[in-house]
Image: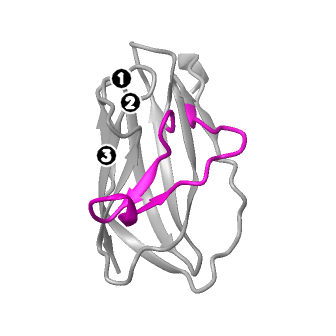
Amino acid sequence: MFMFRKLLLVATFALPTFALAEEQSFAIEGGQVSVPVGLTLQVKAVTIGKDATKVRLLASFDSHATNSVNMNDGSNAYLAWGEGEQNRLHMRQISDNKWMRIGNGQTMEGDLLFPGVLPAGVTKVTLVFNPGRSGEDTSAPGVTLPLELKQ
């Protein structure tokens, strides 16, 4: 790796780690998307507990257009299972990286916490970052990632 003089930074999202009571883990179908600005997201797992939903996310950013992007800029990221605000769980902001800024050439992996639980029987959700923005936005690209939850 040092032969190429390229540095790979792996950071963990700084969220409190705790065991969710009565956890239910799901396998993911779909779960990966790339947007034109150079951001690639992969959901590795979704776990629903008694009081919160946890999403294990891997994010990588490589771009010729900009040095960094914010994944959680003006509007909070959310999980949706239908239309309207009542069908969303909003992400708890990460205390030391509120905007989820990722620099060029970096990879971050960690758990995102969404207070609340998905209703029983929901099998399709959408993870949304920077709603209403384009995937070509060089400061805060919009990303919509459909997920199918399988037991």
Quadrant of the rendering where the C terminus is positioned: bottom left
The location of residue 106, given as percent across then percent down, is 55, 30
Up the image or down, 63 lies above or below 24; here it is above
**Residue type for callout 2:** Pro
Q: How is the image coloured?
A: one colour
Left or right: 144, with 93 as reference point = left
Image quarter of residue 10? top right
Which residue is located at x 38 percent, y 65 percent?
A: 86
Which residue is located at x 54 percent, y 36 percent?
A: 107
Q: Pointer 2: what residue?
A: 141
Q: Nearer the viewer, residue 30 or 124?
A: 124
* Disc 2 residue crowd, few under 14, some 14–19, many 20+, Cα 10 Å: many
Cα distance in 3D space between marks 2 and 1? 4 Å
Up the image or down, 4 lies above or below 21; here it is above
Cα distance in 3D space between marks 3 and 2? 10 Å
Q: Pointer 1: what residue?
A: 137
Residue ranking furthest to the bottom = 22
Q: Nearer the viewer, residue 106 or 14?
A: 14
Give whichever of discs 1 and 3 has the lower sequence position. Answer: 1
Which region shows up in magenta? 72-101
| SS class, disc 3 | strand
